[in-house]
Amino acid sequence: MKPIYILNGPNLNRLGKREPEIYGTTTLAEVEAMCREAAGENALEFRQTNSEERLIEWVHTAIDEAAGIIINPAAFTFTSLALLDALKMFPGPIIELHISNIHRREPIYHRSYVSMIATSVMAGFGPEGYSIAVRALVARLAA
Ligand code: CA2
């Protein structure tokens, strides 16, 4: 099977190091390890970038190479029509994931462009949400 791409947007490299009351104390490296465990034999590409251009280029690569995408676009969720356009080209399932429940937060975090094309949306499960998303996507791809 083609790999699952897990793509993370800006500032998530700081996970576990700031605002633990919102995002928890788990680091992104620990999240990656949790995802690999949840994926079992399935191949994963786990990436983080602070660059919108790079994130879009990774979506383009995923169009050719990935079975499914799990994406935490972070702030680009609410700003990037370019990311929305790139994700529209992806033929497989896309899970939009947020560690926090963005709908409990300030109004600027309520309108997601990515949700307009996501297959599924997850928010508020904390860092464990990534493992849940991997299991859900593996099951969906196997079905
Ligand atoms: O809850 C999420 O996963 C978010 O996508 C995280 C984004 C935020 O802009 C979204 O509204 C919700 C990025 C949060 C800022 O980066 C931090 C990373 C680690 C620790 C604290 C902040």
Image (cartoon, rainbow, N blue to C red):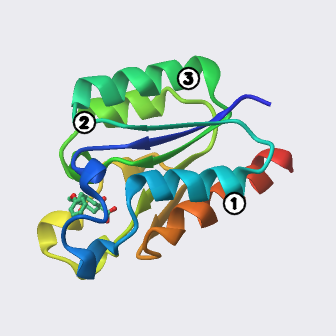
Viewer-closest of 28 and 66:
28
The residues bearing labels 1 and 3 have C-alpha atoms spaced at a distance of 20 Å
Decide: is 33 above or below 43.
Answer: below
Q: Amino acid under label 3?
A: Ile
Decide: is 28 above or below 59.
Answer: below
Q: Amino acid under label 2?
A: Leu
Which quarter of the frame holds ligand 1?
bottom left
Which element is circle 1 on? helix
Q: What residue sits 25% from the left and 82% below the top?
A: 21
> Left or right of 66: which side holds 85?
left
Find disc 2 in the rendering and name its residue.
81
x, y percentage for residue 10? 23, 44
Q: Does the CB distance between marks 2 and 1 fall below 8 Å?
A: no
Q: Amino acid under label 1?
A: Ala
Of tags 3 and 2, the one toward the viewer is 3
The residues bearing labels 3 and 2 have C-alpha atoms spaced at a distance of 17 Å
Q: Residue reaching furthest right?
A: 143
Q: Which mark is residue 63?
A: 3
Which element is circle 2 on? helix
